[in-house]
Image (cartoon, rainbow, N blue to C red):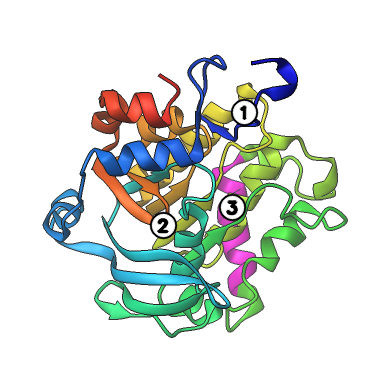
Amino acid sequence: MSDSETPSVSGYGEGTTDTVLSVDAVADEAQALGLEVSGDKVLQLAGERPLVQIQGLTAGYGRMEILHEVDLAVGSGQSLCLVGPNGAGKSTILHSIFGFTDIFGGSIKVDGIEVTKSSPSERLRDAGIAYILQDNSVFPDMSVEENLLMGGYLLPNPNLAKEAAERVFERYDRLAQRRTDKAGVLSGGERRLLEISRALIMDPKVLLVDEPSIGLEPRYIDMVFEILGDLKDRDGKTIIMVEQNAKKGLACADVGYVLVSGRVAMADQGPALLENPDVGRLFLGG
């Protein structure tokens, strides 16, 4: 076949062109494995007492259904990483937990309380769910301190946001040194730290983190994962993340889910998924 006849392939994972699989091929091979993730398996990985539990979730945008009867559970103080090919529905799970999608079926509970029909503001204020968006969500013309205070817009008293911001500055000296600087002049790592810290102003139980390493230089990626690990281990935050660097995400997560075509194809402890040869071949580039 000549170069002009070579079909275009949308690939996923790392490796040479000889090892790249198309998204459709990944989905077909994953389904051919005959893997099913039971509700019992999901609960077992969450320690039997999940803080966040999704049951039979069918969701999407408008009339477009993206997720198909997804079950998910994560315990208090656990981290869960969602990996899979582009278009698998990873970010749609985060959007659904925070209230950004249309729910067609199933339920979402936080600490035993159903939030399926709650608004994003209600989920943040009442259920303690905070969403940390992908890069570039800071307000560039506002100072670091002003950005932090924006994270407390739902608090009943502005002084509570100021007190929370001071706790952030006490914890992260890197931000304290830049508190009066405009956020637009921060480095990529500093902006990511600011985005994470802004979410902490409401003292959430659950942090939804969308692509924490996206757009960062390699030297900042480890820093961001160390910050998230510290929030989990020291503060007991529950973290649900989508991460483009699947190897890094699974290595740092207590639990990992592999999504394919809007369904959970595999679920296990993060390091176990990382060592699974099928996961390596289909989702990690070999």
Secondary element at tag 1: helix
In the image, residue 106 lies at what x, y percent? 31, 76
On screen, residue 113 above or below 275 = below
Residue type beneath disc 2: Gly
Circle on res. 255: none
Residue at mark 2: 262
Residue at mark 1: 220
Taking the magenta stretch, the answer to whether it contains residue 47 is no
| Position of residue 267 in the picture relative to residue 47 (left or right) | right
Residue nearer the viewer, 36 or 49: 36
| Position of residue 165 in the picture relative to residue 243 (left or right) | right
* Part of the protein shown in magenta: 160-172
Within 10 Å of the Cα at label 2, are there few (<14), some (14-19), or many (20+) other Cα atoms? many
- Residue at 20%, 54% (x, y): give it: 42
In the image, residue 181 lies at what x, y percent? 83, 47
On screen, residue 68 above or below 224 = below
